[in-house]
Image (cartoon, rainbow, N blue to C red):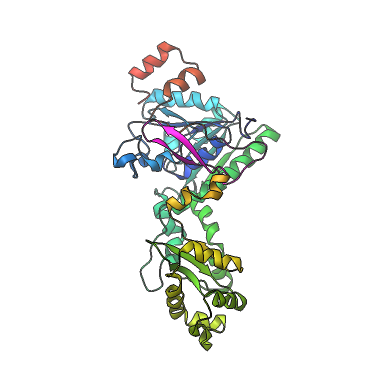
Amino acid sequence: MPGKALEGLKVLDFTWVAAGPIVGLYLAHHGATVIHVESTHRPDILRTAAPYKDNIPGLNRSGDWDAYHSNKLGMGLNLGHPKGVEVAKRLVIWSDIVAENFAPGIMKKLGLSYDDLKNLKPDIIMASTSNLGQTGPEALQPGYGTMLVSYAGFTSLTGWPDRTSVKPYGAYTDFVAPRFLVTALLAALDYHRRTGKGQYLDMSQLEAGAQCLAPALMDYAVNGRIWTRMGNECPYAAPHGAYSCQGDDRWCAIAVFNDEEWDALCQIMGNPDWTKKPEFATLLGRKKNEEELNERIGEWTKNFSAEKIVEKLQAVGIRAGVVKNAADVQDDPQLAYRHYFWQLEHPEIGLHSYEGPGFILSKTPAEIKSPSSLLGEHTEYVCREILGMSDEEFIDLLGQGVFE
């Protein structure tokens, strides 16, 4: 196996929940040594989030937490203990990158701010990711991505126009921000390679999330229009939606953007009489009569499997896709061919799939070689093999509760 792209990179990871741990995950998949720090006094809250293996709760049984921590070393360290902070500082000296996503100000209270870290290691790269960034009038407001989706404006656009707003599933911004932060870290590493200097990265998850709303923000800035909830509709396509198919909760998505695609769809459907109505002859007409159009399309799709409809429509150049569930994705032959899922044996969860990165490096492909760690699983290894602690020192600190 060739060397990994980030082999030799050393990362000290104080992050928790999702936005931070996903950053460490990407780095670990490409060869970085990532030490993820937790404490039994305050374990990552995702360890208490379902789904659990066999529906039995446990700090090492959460599929949610497990998904973001493969390839990492898990260390138990009580930062509420003065000697725990001293151990953390020794880890900083070992590290190239320190990452955290606590509320702004917490690392400073612990004596682990960027200024503190620079005194220990002048060329350290530190990355902080928080809801609103480290500066500004509202920066100290704590919260999670589940709240930030509304702050960023996603909730106002999600749902049906005649119903109340709904938020996207989960903490949507938690899965947007890591892509930006990993890119910024690679830029910081390049800067370090050229100059020998470190720097501080201040990631606002609000600002990262807003990038996904660029069309709506631009439309307001230029035209003064405020986008509202449209359900599955699109301003310049009809039909454009998800339609029920044969089977239990099976659906297909269909999008028609011009008259040529509409004519092709009509032919696939057998040119029923209703398609010849003048109100459906143009895109503007189809948009004005979209409710009836969707009902008509749904009456046709319910007679076929989603896969069959998609096959027919894609063959004539119409945008269509199966609305897949988790089983469909797990069994997808395209993903299997590209080895997207990695099968690993976890001590408590058992054999199951881990997601790989969404790209392949031809010379230095990613490798997922170890499952997520049990809480504090690698504490002794980190202390003895990485920090070089003697048996006596480790046992003494263990007895004082430093590694809890």
- Is 79 contained in the magenta span? no
Q: Is residue 358 above or below residue 382?
A: below
Q: Quadrant of the C terminus?
A: top left
Instruction: Please tell me which residue lies in front, 22 or 64.
Output: 64
Query: In which image quadrant can residue 165 be found?
Result: bottom left
Q: Is residue 382 above or below residue 99?
A: above
Position in image of residue 166 (x %, y %): 38, 63
Instruction: Please tell me which residue lies in front, 278 or 48.
Output: 278
- Which residues, given as a range, are shown in magenta? 338-367
Position in image of residue 365 (x %, y %): 62, 37
Instruction: Please tell me which residue lies in front, 76 or 261.
Output: 261
Position in image of residue 115 (x %, y %): 53, 34
Q: Residue at x 57, y 32 (%)?
A: 32
Position in image of residue 65 (x %, y %): 40, 40
Q: Residue at x 62, y 30 (%)?
A: 1
Q: Examine the rendering and report whether any part of residue 133 can be seen.
A: yes
Q: Extreme left residue here?
A: 56
